[in-house]
Amino acid sequence: MLWQGWSVFECQPRDASLRPLGEGRPPGLHLGAVLHRMKVAAGDKVDGVEGDQEGVRMQEGFLLESALEYVAAGMTLDGALELAFKRYMIAIRSGITRQVAVERDGIHMTPDALDPERGLIESYKMTRRSLRGARTQEDFEANYWHWLCQEKSYCLAMGVDTCRWIVLWQAGDYSRGVGSGPQMLECTATFTPEELLANWATVLMHAEALR
């Protein structure tokens, strides 16, 4: 596997309805602006957390707002947050990627997105697990092997060899130091044909046990 390490994925804040911030808001004075001024007047801290990636904490708030609607419908909070993040990513990537569904050897799959221009799939993940366990290729392969298994299966089914992960690491690396808060990062991995086929052989072995 040829793995390119993590780099920052620029957060593009969208509100809970997935519209760009400010779009659809009526003109005039809003309570949020008044409350912000009141906090400044009271001497409260209004700046972001030092070292934080711009916009990510704000986006988490909007994702939670969407997720609570799913929770009210019966989903678990973790499942609801993951779905909210996938919907957010599909919205901001809509001009570049498209959702797909594919089947191979009787197994149905739904990759998050396909980028036909670059010939790769994209995977959108949101996790509270520590980024510390994925900093290196060795750690990523050991601790997130299930992500790799999933995306290698999708790659084989779609006839591509590359996956781009875009991940919201909600808890950063757990160090609580400057710059260790929530981060939206991306990485890319390219697989050999041998890796894809070996992975699929393992998938089929376990699939047969379920048939």
Image: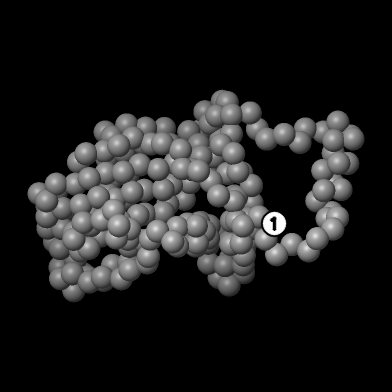
The spot of residue 93 in percent (x, y) is 45, 58
The spot of residue 159 in percent (x, y) is 18, 61
Judge whether residue 130 can be spotted in this image. no
Snapshot colouring: one colour
Residue 7, quarter of the rendered image: top left
The spot of residue 180 in percent (x, y) is 53, 31
Q: Residue at x 84, y 58 (%)?
A: 28
Q: Residue at x 85, y 35 (%)?
A: 40
Residue 130, quarter of the rendered image: top left
Residue under circle 1? Answer: 22
Judge whether residue 30 can be spotted in this image. yes
The spot of residue 68 in percent (x, y) is 62, 63
Q: Residue at x 26, y 38 (%)?
A: 3
Left or right: where 77 falls relative to 118: right
Closer to the camera, 82 or 96? 96
Disc 1, SS: loop
Quadrant where the C terminus sits is bottom left
Residue 28 higher or lower than 143, as above or below: below
